[in-house]
Image (tube, grey):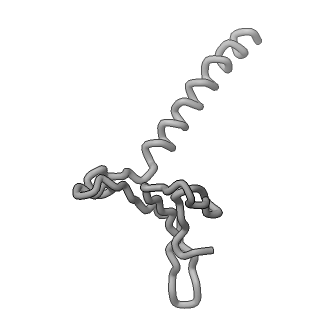
Amino acid sequence: MSQMLKRNRLTTPILLLFLLSVAILSQPALDPGSTVDPATGRMMFQLPLGTVRGAGIDYPINLGYAAGIQYYQEASSVGLGFSVDPPC
């Protein structure tokens, strides 16, 4: 019984590390060359969150970020500098 307990103590962290690495590697990659404007240095990107299927048409849902936050700018419902396209 103690041998089984020792194996579980070792197996669980290894399994969690494996699952975390798979989750990280399966995320869409952001290319710095396409996210940063070379003329201004401003960073912007869009991450696809999913697609809502409708009657004959699909609506893609994206999470976008734009750098260049101003001191008077208020956060949106998804965070400061972030937006959802199409708006919810």
- Tell whether 9 sits left or right of 47: right
Q: Residue at x 43, y 55 (%)?
A: 67
In the rendered view, tell whether residue 87 sits above or below residue 69: below
Q: Residue at x 43, y 62 (%)?
A: 46
Which of the pair 46/28 is nearer the observer?
46
Q: Quadrant of residue 71?
A: bottom right
The single residue placed furthest to the top in the displayed view is 2
Residue 41 x/y as whole percent? 29, 52
Q: Quadrant of the N terminus?
A: top right
Residue 34 x/y as whole percent? 28, 58
Q: Quadrant of residue 72?
A: bottom right
Residue 43 x/y as whole percent? 36, 55
Residue 54 x/y as whole percent? 58, 85
In the rendered view, tell whether residue 19 sits above or below residue 54: above
Which of the pair 50/45 is nearer the observer?
45
Which of the pair 30/7 is nearer the observer?
30
Which of the pair 87/80 is nearer the observer?
80
Q: Residue at x 58, y 75 (%)?
A: 87
- Tell whether 69 sits left or right of 12: left
Q: Quadrant of the C terminus?
A: bottom right
Question: How many marks can you see?
Answer: 0
The single residue placed furthest to the bottom in the displayed view is 56
Q: Residue at x 60, y 56 (%)?
A: 79
